Structures are given as C-alpha cells and as structure tokens.
Amino acid sequence: MLNRYPLWKNLMVLIVVLVGALYALPNIYGEDHAVQISATRGGEVNTQTLQQVESALRQADITPRGISMENDQILVRLNSDEEQLAVREMLVSELGIQYVVALNLAPATPSWLESIGGAPLKLGLDLRGGVHFLMEVDMDEALGKMREQMVTSVRDRLLEERIRYRGVREDGNDVVIELRTAEDFQSAVTSLRNQYQGYETRTSAADNSIRLVMTELQLQEIRANAIDQNITILRNRVNELGVAEPLIQRQGQDRIVVELPGIQDTARAKEILGATATLEFRFVDMENSLSDALQGRVPFGSRLYPMRDGGQILVENRIILTGDHIVNAATGFDENGRPQVDITLDSVGGRLMSQATRDRIGDQMATVFIEFVATGETTEEGRIEFERIEEVVSAPTVQARLGSSFRITGVGGVQEAQSLALLLRAGALIAPIQIVEERTVGPSLGAENVKAGLTAIVAGFVLVLIFMTIYYRKFGLVANMALLTNLVMIVGVMSMIPGATLTMPGMAGILLTVGMAVDANVIIFERIREELKEGRSPQQAIARGYDNAFSTIADANITTLITALILFAVGTGSIKGFAVTLAIGIVTSMFTAIVGTRAVINLTWGRKKRLTELSI
C-alpha cells in the first residue's frame, strides 16, 4: 500500500498555510512611533491644520517617516521615541488647547496588505504600553437625574388626566405628590399605580398625599444602567476620537476600567474620557416677567439661566427631553450662513418633542448646554467634587410642530458646532466619573515584556527542535516544520480576529501550545515505531500509526479546548487572553500535527513503492 493524499487535500493544506502566513506577515513590519492630532472643543482638523503641522516640522528640521490626514485626524509617523516626544511637545505649543496631541504607535503595514485586511497582531497594555484608568461613577448624580425625570413624568401624567395637585417634589429618593381634593387624591392613586407599577405607592388620605418609593431592586437597576450606559458612551467617545483598540469594562458595582494601549499621554487621555456634555430642551417662561426675576422674584416652576452670548433668560423647570434621546448630530448652516447643529432623535424622543411642541407654537424653546467640570477639591469621602455648569446656547421660536429631526442655532463658530456635534454623537455621560487610580505603562516596559515573552517562546521552541531532531531524525525535522507553521498560523489567525489582543498570559498560552503540538507528533511517531517493531512494512506503519494515534490526540485536545472555552466564558482580562491563544493554538496544532505532517510525510516517503526503512 502507498500513503497518498488526493490533490485537493494537498492543495487545501497549502492554501491554509499560505493564508495563515499572509495574515501573519504584517507583524514583521512592526509599528512606527507616531503623534496623533484630533480636534477638541473649539478645534477643527483640516488642510490648514495639516499645513501648520508640516510647517512646524520643517522649522524644527524634523523629517517624518510619513504624514497623513484621514477621518478628521492627522497622523505623523516619526523615526524614534525621542523624536516622538519632541514633536509632541512642539505641536502642543504650536496648536494650542483646541487640539488633542497624543502619543501613539501606528502600524507600518504596507498598503497592499491593508487592502486585503492584513493588520498586525494587537498587543495589550502590558506589551505595548499605554494608560490604565480605574474610574468611579458618581451614583448620586445618576439618582438625582432619575428623580428629576420622575418628577417631570408625574406632573405630565397628572396634567394629561386633568388631576389637580398642589405640588410634586423630591424627598430623598422618593417622589411626593400633594393633591388638592379627596376626589383628586382617589383619581391620582388609581392613575399612578397603573403607570408606575414598579414603585411602592404609599398613600395618606389625611392630607391627600401620595409617596412613590423607589424599591431596592429599582435602585440597583438604576446603578447598573448608569454603569452600562457610561461604558457605551466612553467607548463611543474613544472611537470618535480615534484611540485604537481600547479596553473598557465594568469592575464591581460602580467602577469602570479603561485601558488605552499605545497612548502614553495621561493628561490628554483624561481630557478625552472626562468630557461630559449634554443638552436639555426646555421652554422659555413667556408668562412671567424677566425683569422681575432678575430682581430676585423668580416665579415658582421657573429659573434663570445664563446665555452663552451674555445676559440671562427665564426658563421653565420642566424638561421636554434630554440628550439621551439624540442618535445623531451633524453640523450645518442656516439661511444666513451661521453654523447650526442638526439633531436626530430616537423614536421616543421624537414622540416627546412632538407632544411638547404641539400646543406651544410661537413660544421660545431653550437649548440648555450642561457640562460637569472637576473643581479640584474632594469630599470627606475622598470623591472629586464636580461643578455643574449650565448655559442656554439658543432660544429660537417654535414655528411648527417638531418631530425627530430639528436644528439648534446660536452655537458659536464652526469649530464649536463641530465639537458639540461630536460630543452629542458620542453621547453624554449619564453621571460624572472620577479617576480613582491611574497607571502608565511606558513603551520601554512594554518592549521589555515583549522581549521576555519572545525569549521564552524561542528558548522553548529551540529546545523542542533539538530534541525532536536528535530523537526522531528526519521525522523529527518534519515535526519541527509543523511546529514553525503552527506558530505562524496562531499569529495569523489572531491577527485576523477583530478585537483579539495578545497579552503576556497570551504568550504563555502560545508557549503551552508548542508543547502540546509536539506531544501529538510524539504520539504518532511512537505508534509508527511500534508498528515497525511488530513487523509491519514502512507504508503500513505510517498509515496505522496516524490512524491509531488520532483518537488519543483528539481526546486530549478536545478536553483541553473545552477547558479553554470555560476559561474564556467565566474569566476576565488576562485569563481571557490566555484562553483565546490556547484555544486557537489547539485547533492549529491539531491541523499541523495531524494533517500537515502527514501531507509532508506522504509526499516524502508515501510514494516510494520499495521503501524498506524509515528515518525515525
């Protein structure tokens, strides 16, 4: 008998190996030290900015490896980390606070590889360097916003049902409703119990009052939603500003971990993450006198707001809707050529806006811009104090019933309009966050970790190669070829998977798969030796050796694969990284150790009719 693979199987092995090698190839080119420039509030990245950057580089006699502008960002590739730091300092001084000038590492992949989706393996914070933040969400602000929305919702409900009330107010986490008559009290009890079934309703007929109490389950849900929404918004914010491959995940009940590999500029990273901006839409109080309010006689249900362009305006407390309902924001120009922001709302926001403006045509609607700014002081509990800054950016007259799409004007210049649109697209943080821990991993430390990991992999690999060559001779060389192919395929597969990141534990997983891969070949070769000792011909020994060893190898690898999947499902962070590389390594090692080596052995020895001995 002869050992031969059909042509299609040989071609399949060749294609799989070539594809793996092709997508592993970008890792050879490495990364360039780079400076990334993007706009912050009041800034705009355009061709003029590009020319300004190029001029500054010429004056400093610095020749970059490349400079490009795309996706509203400028990327300057430089020759060394020293040059990178010098250029960053120079551009910060040159461009000013209107721009984010961040240190980064940019892939040096050739364009022809990028055109087919080739990209280098993404390295984690411990291998690439970057910044790590542990952030804590201000839950008091999240609960306060929920209470404010609840008060507005209850008032709207009572007005719709034509139920008269003396007042609706907050009391701790509860909402207290005071009704005018016993009849109003009974109607309100029925209506509110139907509308707010998740709340505990406590009534007092003696003074015609109702108390809506947030249950502990609701409080937990509000806290969980605040964390989840802030994670989504932080991820959108980072993506909008072009920070590559961030890790943003929840930790505990009120904390968020943010890791930005490739970024060493902690101050700028804080600026990217800490911006908190949102809008609230409220009607201007058209019934009461602004001059009386300015003299201290502010009517109940309204308050004074500063205008962005100076002066003050009297605005109703009732919120029509908040920026949470904004799904898109883009800049444009009005009929007079002035900048504006075009707003698109979700279905709920569109319905609320339509209902609110149905009977208020001819009234003014104020767009309130809200921002939280850290004061630099801390509370007794050690939390950073935030100052809530509110201003009205525009107060146009409602000329027609509004829906899901409308515009706001009076937002300043073009740059301010673009910056506001960017923040609104990315979303507003549900509650302010404070950084309770920050850590910077320098690129030099990351490079040392990479070097240590590669040294371990190479040392283990070389020792295995020596052993296999001495002990199994020519068959050992085939196994060594499979091991090398296995490493290349692991790198290629991980480079192809979106979001896959290699960390130090991941490198340990790769080293482990090297041992597992050679273990499969040891089992096969020992079975071939046993068949030869029993008097089988070399061709029979090869065939029976592979066939008999397959079940043993499959059982061992499948159980390990199940373990890797469990680690990935229940683990976090570095454990997931280890599980991913282990799982990929198991699949590729089974392919190279069983299918790949047999293809080579079949081509080398399987076609010889008069084969009398094997070099094994």
Image: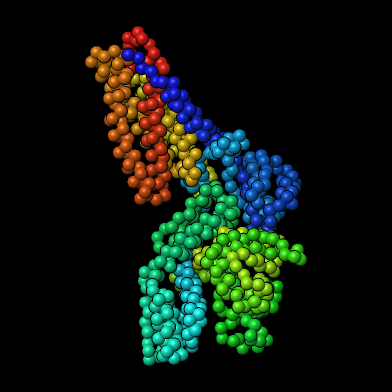
Q: In the rendered view, tell whether residue 562 sits above or below residue 405.
A: above
Apparent side of residue 403 relative to residue 223 in the rendered image (left or right): right
Q: How is the image coloured?
A: rainbow
Residue 156, percent across and down? 51, 78
> In percent of the image, x 50 and y 74: which residue is there?
149
Q: In the rendered view, tell whether residue 163 sits above or below residue 246.
A: below
Any part of residue 556 in sight: yes
Q: Residue furthest right?
A: 336
The C terminus lies in quadrant? top left
Q: In the rendered view, tell whether residue 178 sits above or below residue 242.
A: below
Residue 472 or 530: which is nearer the viewer? 530
> In percent of the image, x 56 and y 86: which residue is there?
300
Q: In the rendered view, tell whether residue 312 sits above or below residue 250.
A: below
Residue 362 or 459: which is nearer the viewer? 362
> In percent of the image, x 38 and y 74: which residue is there?
197
Any part of residue 391 in sight: no
Apparent side of residue 176 relative to residue 288 in the rendered image (left or right): left
Residue 383, percent across and down? 48, 68
Where is residue 597, by image quadrant?
A: top left
Residue 289, percent across and down? 66, 86
The N terminus lies in quadrant? top left
> In percent of the image, x 75 and y 65: which residue is there?
335
Q: Residue furthest top?
A: 610
Where is residue 338, by image quadrant?
A: bottom right
Q: Number of callouts in the render?
A: 0
Residue 76 or 390: which is nearer the viewer? 390
Residue 495, percent across and down? 49, 39
Apparent side of residue 614 relative to residue 422 in the rendered image (left or right): left
Q: Residue furthest left?
A: 534
